[in-house]
Amino acid sequence: MIPILYLSHCGSSIGGGEKQLYYLVTHLNKNLYQPIVVCPDDGIFAEQLREANIPTTILNLPPWRKVVSRLTRRTAAAKLTDLAKKHNVRLVHTSDSWLNPYLLQVKNQLNVPVISHVRNILTPAQIAKYNFDQMSRIIAISEQSKSPLVQAGVPSEKIDVVLNCVDISVFQPDSKKKRESDPFIVGIVGRIEPFKKQKTFVEIASHVAQQCQNVRFHIIGAALDTPEHRAYDKEVRQLVSEYKLEDVIYFTGHRDDMPRVMQELDLLVTLSAGSVIAEAMASGKTVIGTPIGSTSEMIVDGVTGYVVPLDSIETISDKIVQLVTDFDKCKQMGKAARKHAEEAFSIEKHVQKIQNIYEKLIETINENDV
């Protein structure tokens, strides 16, 4: 078996990146590859990996570019390199591109190929700062996230686009029939933070609530315990109060039962993209998103949902009102979403595409060694 070292952004919580990493390491061909995961802290995700019998090491990897990390990052990089050497690692794959500097340390010391997974839309400054040109390979989750890399001078042939996946056997449509008296539930899923735009979601809810009576909005997720995220969470709740939407908007807090969460919704709204789109579609739910990240490549506009410009709160609100007042259309789009998820977002297809990348990289290294 070929040992592969994975670097996770987090071990103490589970976001979209952690879900995708879990799908990958638990579905690799174990006759060919042995995954070893490094988490910067311990907690729910690290425990999930251990329960799946994935070798997991806790190693603090301080933010490389921050001044306060200057004294600790070199030590952390040395420990990471020692770990890779101990396990005779043949390839290193980071699930978070902000860990690129650590990849380069291992690459330079052990001469192994490295892969950076890009889950965000990067700026030219970020691409230069995190040394993407020195990566052996880059995996982008969409053509949109690939484009800035190419524009910054990274060779296109060095970048593979692999869409996020979902366990379609776990995320299933709800078989329970909805009653006419049941409220129409619109949800947004993710950590409460500026990037997820829950404040915009509250604005949208305010517009819809003025036109539809029997609609409820669920903000699913919690803020991390940081000053920035706590402050944003407070702003979101204050906005709900200002609009007097306490009876319309419900904060669920963190939920670790996402298949059930998706079944509870009638419609998902996402303002930041991510694997939640695949989860909702696999659950037979219509999705409204904005042209960010992989959204435009995951939602079939007008068939499985809608892709609407982010700066048009009224347009998003109008789409929601249309689906509330024409529930048959909403259900029809949800069925199309499930069918599309089965065809496009299976774990098996996702993992095979990544294993093909591994195979080419390792073949190249072996040829160079001959």
Image: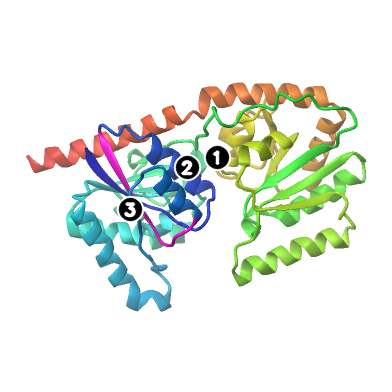
- The residue depicted at 45 percent of the width and 38 percent of the height is 23
Question: Which image quadrant: the C terminus?
Answer: top left
Question: What is the three-letter code of the residue carrying label 3?
Answer: Asp
Q: Is residue 154 above or below residue 104?
A: above
Residue wearing tag 2? 20
Residue wearing tag 1? 294
Residue 36 x, y percent position in the rendering: 31, 48
Residue 247 x, y percent position in the rendering: 88, 51
What is the count of numbered marks? Answer: 3
Residue wearing tag 3? 133
Residue 50 x, y percent position in the rendering: 40, 48
Whether the magenta-drawn stretch holds residue 14 is answered as no
Quadrant in the picture for residue 33: top left
Asked if the residue under mark 1 is in contact with the one under mark 3, i.e. CB atoms within 8 Å, the reply is no
Asked if the residue under mark 2 is in contact with the one under mark 3, i.e. CB atoms within 8 Å, the reply is no
Secondary element at tag 3: helix
Mark 3 vs mark 2, CA separation in Å: 24 Å
Work out whether mark 3 precedes mark 2 in sequence or the reverse, and give the earlier one: 2
- The residue depicted at 42 percent of the width and 67 percent of the height is 63
Residue 244 x, y percent position in the rendering: 90, 57
Secondary element at tag 2: helix
Question: What is the three-letter code of the residue carrying label 1?
Answer: Ser
Estimate how packed mark 3 is, as few (under 14), some (14 to 19) or many (20 or more) residues with alpha carbons within 10 Å. some
Task: Give the image's coloring scheme.
Answer: rainbow
Secondary element at tag 1: loop
- Span shown in magenta: 32-43
